[in-house]
Image (spheres, rainbow, N blue to C red):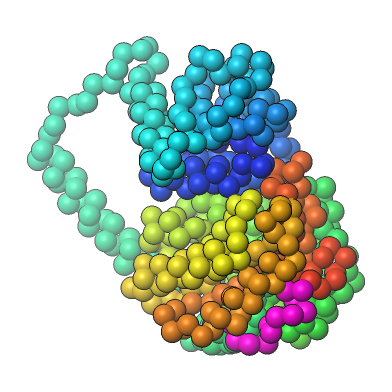
Amino acid sequence: MSHKVFISHASSDKGIADKVCRKLENQRIPCWIAPRDIRPGTEYAAAIIEAIDTCSVFVLIFSKHADNSNQVKREVNQCVDKEKILLTFRVEDFEMSDTMQYYLKNTHWRDGFEQPLDQQLGRLVDDVQHFIKKGSDVIDNGIPKLPPKPKLRKYLFILIICTCTVTLILLCLHFCWRRPAEKCDAFIGAAYWLNFIVYDPVNYDPYMNIMPSESSIRKDINILRTYDFDGLITMNCKGTLKHIARIAKEEGFNQVIVGIYDLRDEEELENAISVSNWADAYCVGSRGLNRFYSKSELKDAVKLLRRKTTCCISTTESIVDYLKNPDIISMIDFLFPDVSITDSCLTPEYVYDSTIKTAKYAAEKFQSFNKPIFLKMISFPSGGSGCFSDQKQKNFYYLMLEKAIERKDIPNYIIFTFMSAFDPVWKTDENFWPVYEKYTGLFTSDRQPKPAILEVQWRKKHH
């Protein structure tokens, strides 16, 4: 399913843009938003133009930052040129520039700075749904579509056939896709006791196609092992990144979850399969369902790995997307939801409390599937905003590692994993990342440990 909505925003407004995106996608309105939906290595301008050209509604998160952003102005210009429906969500009350006034004076508005925000977001969703429906109810000749006359008997027969078909498909998925329990026992059993960290190499830049050498990867891995990390999560298997699993095992890592970012890339899939002797599990795709690949493509990739390897398999999606696609849960061995909580100004206590609530929510919603849940992308930046610092990052990890372990309200099949090992310097504003994203590492980009490493007890079992 392609996206219906393009969300335009300044990088400083990513927090509110993400909230708008979640609100819309919770109502099953697929969105396109940068940087989430821009693949590393693609041309940004081309990706954005294509996304705008194929959307039904263009939602502008309008603030002073957006008013001053040349990138946002270019996106609005493309929207106007393509005669898209433009819906402006104002998050600040201010006098706009002449340029924006030229583009926006005759467009639809919704004020998001009026409280409560949730109520305004709800109205925004109603607006978007109205415009999508308005567009979909008109065919090329301008005549509204007329609903066909009901044929109750025919519909009842079709409903019965569809219900039986779906039931058979789910049964097949359950028995044919699931892995024998003993295949994953060793992986799951050890995972509870390991410190897992998401790892992108220091000398790596996916936007510039810069790949690290094996010696550079080994240096990174040795540093992580020095500070008691023994579970590694990679994000993709392109180029020299395929060597990470082997090097990690050679340097003493207990387990490696090998990430496959672009499951349409045959070379990356082949690389991942070639390291199966060192991989303990695979994560096939990362929040790309219906954006970067279809459900059938995901299932084909999982089927290929089942046939070629004996490793456990998962895929990363949001909790909401897992719940919308229970057949995906049936075909994987463990859940691996992205639970990152991002905004330009959050406290360690707030992010900790939100992570705990998310853990409890996931446990409740997925209990019937009887599968382990690895919570992915738990993080807190050390900079990039006045709200973030080394000390606050340290306080957050103290709560996660030394307080969460004492809680009795989180099931033992919930496993915390953290992001990231080193500051990813390629996550820049030019690449559509909020500035704080490049400070999520527990080590700096020159491999120096931060206080969150030096002053927090990482050797404790974190849950």
Query: Along the line of sight, which residue is nearer the eye, 413 or 371?
Result: 413
Query: Along the line of sight, which residue is nearer the eye, 351 or 444?
Result: 351
Residue 321: image x %, image y %? 44, 55
Residue 247 seen in render: no
Asked if 296 appears above or below 314 in the picture, the reply is: above
The quarter of the rendered structure image containing the C terminus is bottom right
Picture residue at 88% right of the left edge, 69% below the top: 216
Asked if 117 appears above or below 363 in the picture, the reply is: above
Residue 389: image x %, image y %? 73, 62
In this rendering, position of residue 342 left or right of residue 385:
left
Residue 255: image x %, image y %? 66, 81
Asked if 318 appears above or below 254 in the picture, the reply is: above
Residue 350 in the magenta stretch? The answer is no
Q: Give the dominant element type of the magenta stretch: helix, strand or loop.
A: loop
Asked if 352 appears above or below 131 in the picture, the reply is: below
In this rendering, position of residue 122 left or right of residue 453:
left
Residue 190: image x %, image y %? 58, 87
Quadrant of residue 129 in the image? top left
Residue 452 in the magenta stretch? The answer is yes
Picture residue at 77% right of the left edge, 79% below the top: 454
Q: How many marks?
A: 0
The residue sitting at the left extreme is 153
Picture residue at 47% right of the left edge, 82% below the top: 407
Provide the residue span drawn in magenta.
Answer: 451-463
Quadrant of residue 81 in the image? top right
Query: Along the line of sight, which residue is nearer the eye, 403 or 245?
Result: 403
Picture residue at 70% right of the left edge, 72% below the top: 394
Quadrant of residue 65 in the image? top right
Residue 308 seen in render: yes
In this rendering, position of residue 147 left or right of residue 237:
left
